[in-house]
Image (cartoon, grey):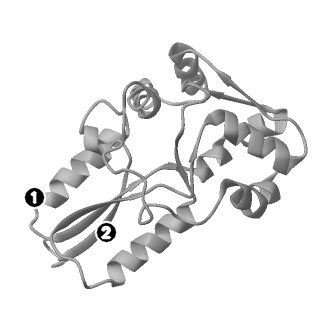
């Protein structure tokens, strides 16, 4: 940024970066937020929810009708379509009405639990998709068996475990943080064609 004279940045961060440590891979986004803040440029950090597209990594599980998570099944959290994040980022870059450091959450249309996600998948796919909560060590072993190195498996698992217990996002849901694409629409437009 310094060598190219970039003075205005919109950075795609994540819900959980406000913790600064203890959230696995999200800790890297937190460190990037801190580094950008230290450059003295105009910066907006977009603290995004869980991507709908993360479900694409579970296509085989969805086909088999069984998802797994280490999170409580009824824990609501923000889920968002990446295309909505892109729209928010573009609008922020084009808007010359802000300066300094800003944080804007991108929460998607509604908070969803894994149970409600499974129910939406069941409805939209026309076949049952169940979700099961598994122990952390079982998920860690699955990451290792998928070929992740141990440090990456720790970091990926940490994104869930670090935001699981007594975590509340710094930015509350509001009209500004709420985006339009529903999980139902995303499943129809993007997931079903890939199944």
Location of the N terminus (image quadrant): bottom left
> Which residue is denoted by mark 1 in the rendering?
38
Q: Earlier in the sequence, mark 2 or mark 1?
A: 2
Left or right, 20 with reference to 59 = left
Q: Position of residue 56 (x, y in %)?
A: 67, 48
Quadrant of res 42: bottom left
Res 1 visible: no
| SS under mark 1 | loop
Question: How far separated are the C-alphas under marks 2 and 1?
Answer: 15 Å
Quadrant of res 46: bottom left
Q: Position of residue 45 (x, y in %)?
A: 29, 60
Left or right, 59 with reference to 163 = right
> Which residue is denoted by mark 2 in the rendering?
10
Q: Residue at x 37, y 26 (%)?
A: 166
Q: Determine crowd level at label 2: few under 14, some 14-19, many 20+ residues with C-alpha closer than 10 A.
A: some
| SS under mark 2 | strand
Instruction: Name the one closer to the observer, 154 or 123.
Output: 123
Instruction: Name the one closer to the observer, 19 or 8.
Output: 19
Disc number for residue 14? none
């Amino acid at each position: 940024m310094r060598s190219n004279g970039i003075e205005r940045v919109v950075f795609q961060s994540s819900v959980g970066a406000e913790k600064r440590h203890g959230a696995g891979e999200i800790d890297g986004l937190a460190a990037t937020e801190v580094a950008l803040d230290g450059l003295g440029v105009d910066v907006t950090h977009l603290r995004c929810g869980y991507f709908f597209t993360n479900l694409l990594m579970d296509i085989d599980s969805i086909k088999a009708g069984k998802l797994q998570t280490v999170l409580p099944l009824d824990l609501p959290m923000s889920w968002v379509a990446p295309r909505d994040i892109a729209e928010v980022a573009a609008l922020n870059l084009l808007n010359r009405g802000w300066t300094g450091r800003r944080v804007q959450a991108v929460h998607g249309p509604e908070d969803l639990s894994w149970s409600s996600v499974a129910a939406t998948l069941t409805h939209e796919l026309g076949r049952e998709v169940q979700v099961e909560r598994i122990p952390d060590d079982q998920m860690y072993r699955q990451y290792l068996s998928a070929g992740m190195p141990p440090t990456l498996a720790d970091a990926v698992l940490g994104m869930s475990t670090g935001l699981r217990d007594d975590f509340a996002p710094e930015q509350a849901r509001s009209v500004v943080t709420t985006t339009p694409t529903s999980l139902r629409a995303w499943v129809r437009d993007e997931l079903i064609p890939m199944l």
